[in-house]
């Protein structure tokens, strides 16, 4: 069984991230390479800014919200981050969610779907690679970058993609399936070590 979690990074009112995330989920389901696809909305997860007293690598979690977040991330085999670009970087809520944990992220592929204006969120996507590789994640070269994202929203606040977006999504998911399968032995080893903490 392979589970993909699509994490919506933006938490602000009237965000574009929610319709983009829903569209990404539709594309992942249509692709068919994953046994389960789940949308994880950081606005609903509602993590406070990091308030754990111990380093995440120790997995000595004090708060229930951290234990729940650990369990959610542990069960995933791969991720897509649906991310905006704020001031040429990625947003604080996503960094905070990443920083709560450590080993739970290990040996998992991450696809980046970024959006924004003329840069299509690509500066944010480039910056976050330094963070995720430090956590032994593997960011895909293949990505979906959406410029002037508002032009792809219809009257019902749904994404109406163009052919470039559809092709980029398929290519990203094709590579993600291959990479997720390749990393499986390392993930299983990590999950065995995490089992007591999440038990």
Image: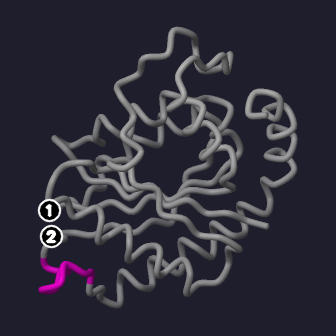
Residue at point 82%, 35% (across, down): 195
Q: Main secondary structure of the magenta part?
A: loop
Q: Position of residue 148 (x, y in %)?
A: 15, 70
Residue at point 29%, 88% (across, down): 162
Residue at point 21%, 43% (across, down): 88
Q: Position of residue 126 (x, y in %)?
A: 38, 47
Front position in the image: 19 or 107: 19
Q: What span is in magenta? A: 151-159
Q: Earlier in the sequence, mark 1 or mark 2?
A: 1
Which residue is label 1 attached to? 117
Front position in the image: 39 or 122: 39
Badge 1 crowding class, 10 Å Cα cut-off, few under 14, some 14 to 19, many 20 or more, is: some
Q: Is residue 40 left or right of residue 156?
A: right
Q: Quadrant of the N terminus?
A: bottom right
* Rendered view: 26 above or below 90: below
Q: Quadrant of the C terminus?
A: top right
Say which element carries label 2.
loop
Q: Is residue 21 left or right of residue 56?
A: left
Instruction: Look at the image and say whether residue 94 sits in the magenta stretch.
Output: no
Check if mark 1's residue and mark 2's residue have beta carbons within 8 Å: yes
Which residue is label 2 attached to? 148
């Amino acid at each position: 069984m392979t589970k993909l979690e699509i994490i919506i990074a933006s938490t602000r009112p009237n965000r574009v991230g929610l319709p983009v995330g829903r569209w990404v989920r539709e594309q992942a389901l249509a692709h068919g390479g994953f046994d389960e696809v789940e949308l994880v909305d950081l606005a609903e997860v509602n993590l406070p800014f990091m308030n754990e007293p111990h380093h995440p690598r120790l997995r000595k979690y004090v708060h229930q919200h951290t234990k729940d977040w650990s369990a959610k991330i542990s069960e995933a085999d791969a991720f897509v981050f649906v991310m905006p670009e704020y001031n040429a970087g990625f947003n604080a809520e996503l960094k905070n969610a990443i920083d709560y944990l450590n080993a739970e992220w290990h040996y998992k592929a991450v696809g980046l779907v970024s959006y924004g204006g003329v840069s299509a969120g690509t500066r944010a996507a480039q910056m976050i690679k330094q963070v995720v590789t430090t956590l032994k994640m593997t960011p895909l070269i293949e990505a979906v970058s959406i410029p002037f994202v508002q032009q792809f929203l219809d009257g019902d606040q749904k994404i109406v993609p163009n052919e470039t977006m559809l092709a980029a999504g398929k290519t990203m998911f094709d590579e993600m399936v291959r990479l997720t399968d390749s990393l499986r032995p390392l993930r299983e080893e990590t999950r065995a070590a995490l089992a007591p903490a999440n038990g």
